[in-house]
Image: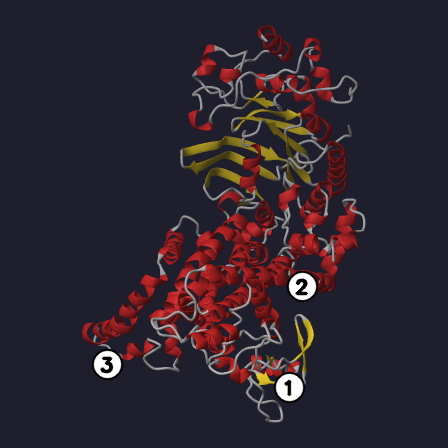
Amino acid sequence: MSRTWGIFFMGYAFQRFGQMMVIVLIALLAVFTTQRLAPGGPFDGERPPPPKILKNLRAYYDMDLSMPAQFYSYLFGMAGRAIEPGGSPGEAYWIALPPEAEVTTLGGTQKRSDDSVLFVRQFCPWGQWFGRMFGAKTDAEGRPLPTLRKCGIIRGDFGLSMVRRSIYVNDYVRDGLPATLKYAVPSLLFALLLGIPMGFYAAYRQNKPADFVMVTVGMFGTIMPNLVMAPLLVFLLAFQFDGFLHWLLVEKLEWIELGRRQRTLNWIPAGKTGGVMHYVLPTLVLGTGLLGRIVRLSRAGALEALRSNYVRTARAKGLPAHVILFRHVLKPGILPVVTYMAPVTAVIMTGSLIIEQAFSLPGLGRQFITAATDRDYTLLMGTTVILLLAVILLNFIVDLAYSWLDPRIRRAGGGRS
Amino acid sequence: MTARTTGTGQPILSMRELVIAFDTPDGVVEAVNGISLDLYPGEVLGIVGESGSGKSQSWMATLGLLADNASTQGEVTFDGHNLLDLDSRTLNTIRGQRISMVFQDPMTSLNPYLDIGTQMIEALGTHDRSLNRADARRRCVEMLDRVAIPDADRRMRQYPHELSGGMRQRVMIAIALLNDPDVLIADEPTTALDVTIQAEILDILTELQRERGMAVVFITHDLGVVAELCSRVCVMYAGELVEVGPVQEVFEDARHPYTLSLMRATPRTTNTGSSAADDRAPDAAKRAALYAIPGAPPNMRLRPPGCAFEPRCRCAEPRCRTEAPALEALSDQPHRHKACFRTGSSEDLSRELLDVG
């Protein structure tokens, strides 16, 4: 199996990478166009900037170009743009050429003109770009790496934020993504590790009280909005739970002697950073929605497998129940859950918007919303690309997992490559 | 036709007053209505009847394979155990090892997520823990060879979707026979296959039955197959046995109107004189359009108080409407049984059926 799998994987990955590029390009174009068509712009405010500054700002962010040229510049960067000196926040990232220099622009090689100062992009080697992209400030020898410059998203430069003009979108992403993942991954693990056994148990005990409980949990998780869950859990767990425990253990049962103190208050992440208990509330809020869906999906998958003819065959062979469950029911049973893992990225992102607001976490979702309302074009594009890549990557992994689980798909996809 | 051992000696498996009821949202439906039947070692027992007559369910119950909403009464005795209320551990030592089953639909009866080898080896391994994997594998390959699957070694690594329907049914048969069972229940094993493949599968089954001397229960719609294969036949209607006896005698001299009607409703070609069933057809029926039994089987929830076949029966008497006939031995042939008040010979009954039709 491993050899076939390897060949299949190579061809498949290659094919998917091409598709991925096309999808990213189309999505970028869509976001780029729609946000520019929406009323308002990043430089609008109560007090508009002076005309000269506005002109330079627009020039720095390529906003004075035609839309196709702007998009080209966003993708690949653009050399040889002449802007007036002074007033531009982007000036620091451009370098002046000596007067005799020849400059390569879109229109071909040309001499530097005398009446305006010509600025061009400064390129730096790939290794340095990568270093900056992943957050390194110095290279291996300890020399400072140059900051990313206007060179297009293709080289990993998401550009400067248009509203907070001294901050790179790359830095936003670098800070925001781990903060989001820090709560997304535990809640996904929580939902999977609890949801799949719950769903299978419910299917195994179909129409019995246990099944009813599981289905209710599933329903509750599915319909309860995170918006309600977050304050509710804060109220119940962070504020009331401690008092309840105190009442139960000290006053009612008189098991232990202890003073009144709000031990669970620091479950609120903003309260005090660092502890494991911080994960409890965000994970529960984000996790219950996922848990509900996963319980329902795995229950449905397991039920279908349990009713199938091949499980009847397995029973007729005299296999004990646990062998039937793990060998014959597990794979087909978790397939619906695996399918759900692709759109789950979107669910987690929208969910993390809520928990980031509710628990004051510096995540990517918050930046996404801020960017959209502020018309921060570059930040919105940057966060969109990151989310898109996450969704595409998960889809890819799900497809691979699917073909690993289901030999029929493996055959159909791998035949061509 | 070859000589076969007919029912002699101690029965290997016996059903007594087996009742199977399903608890459905519309109420309790009795699919099988107290049937009693013996299966003798080495015989090939045919079970025929319309869809929904309970022929599959009664044998599914034997292996504890009924759906969750089913309940059973009566007993099925095998090797001193009542299979109907056996704990799952003991039941698992019997099913797959002493009694195994081949199902109707080979396309869905194999797990599409596991390769053939895994699905075969597990059938051996679960009954014999001491067996090592290499030996188990060798036995599986031998068994695949035995059911005429070419290139068995490679097939072991393939998945069910890479095999044709006939191949899959052979694999099912191979799995069922791996542990050399005493009883093989074949539940319409050829219904889903095309005719040429059907013949091959039947040949393999016949050959293996003869070679191993196991008892085979052959559940089918196909009277021709029963005539060809079986030594004894049970005709079922609406969850009850209506006629039981040696194949040749039942087909040549059917005593129950339902059996007669069934045989008249069987299409036949003129030049297959080998089958016993063909000779029975009245001349007029041969020339006429294919006979169909009027009406439909009764709704199992609204079962008539008398004989279940009475509303469709052209030989019915007034008391058939109120009293249900029991399965009793024929007065002239005590080894044959039928459930009908009419005592007329086969000729009388078929004349009556024909006159009105």
Q: Chain of mark 1?
A: A
Evaluate whether label 3 is on the same chain as label 2.
yes
Q: Is residue A413 above or below residue B166?
A: below
Q: Which residue is mark 1?
A: A99
Label 3 vs label 1: CA separation?
73 Å
Amino acid, disc 2: Ala
Which quadrant would residue A123 be assigned to in this image? bottom right
Badge 1 element: loop
SS for callout 3: loop
x and y percentages locating residue A360 in the rendered image: 35, 74
Q: Is residue B270 left or right of residue A67?
A: right
View extreme (left): residue? A251
Q: Earlier in the sequence, mark 2 or mark 1?
A: 2
- Badge 2 is on which residue? A13
Q: CA distance from mark 3 to mark 2?
A: 56 Å
The chain carrying label 3 is: A
Secondary structure found at label 2: helix
Looking at the image, residue A191 sits to the left or right of residue A395; the answer is left
Residue nearest the observer in this picture, B17 or A11: A11
Query: Are both tags, 2 and 1, on one chain?
Result: yes
**Callout 2: residue from which chain?**
A
Graded by Cα atoms within 10 Å as few (under 14), some (14 to 19) or many (20 or more), the crowding at tag 2 reads some
- The percent position of residue B31, horizontal first and vertical second, equals 49, 32
Is residue B109 positioned above or below A149 on the image? above
Tell me where residue B93 appears, x and y as whole percent: 59, 52
Looking at numbered disc 3 in the image, what kind of residue is underneath it? Arg
Q: Which residue is mark 3?
A: A261
Going by the picture, which residue comes out furthest to the right? B151
Which is more foreground, mark 2 or mark 1? 1
Nearest the viewer among A353 and A82 is: A82
Residue A354 position in % (x across, y down): 37, 66
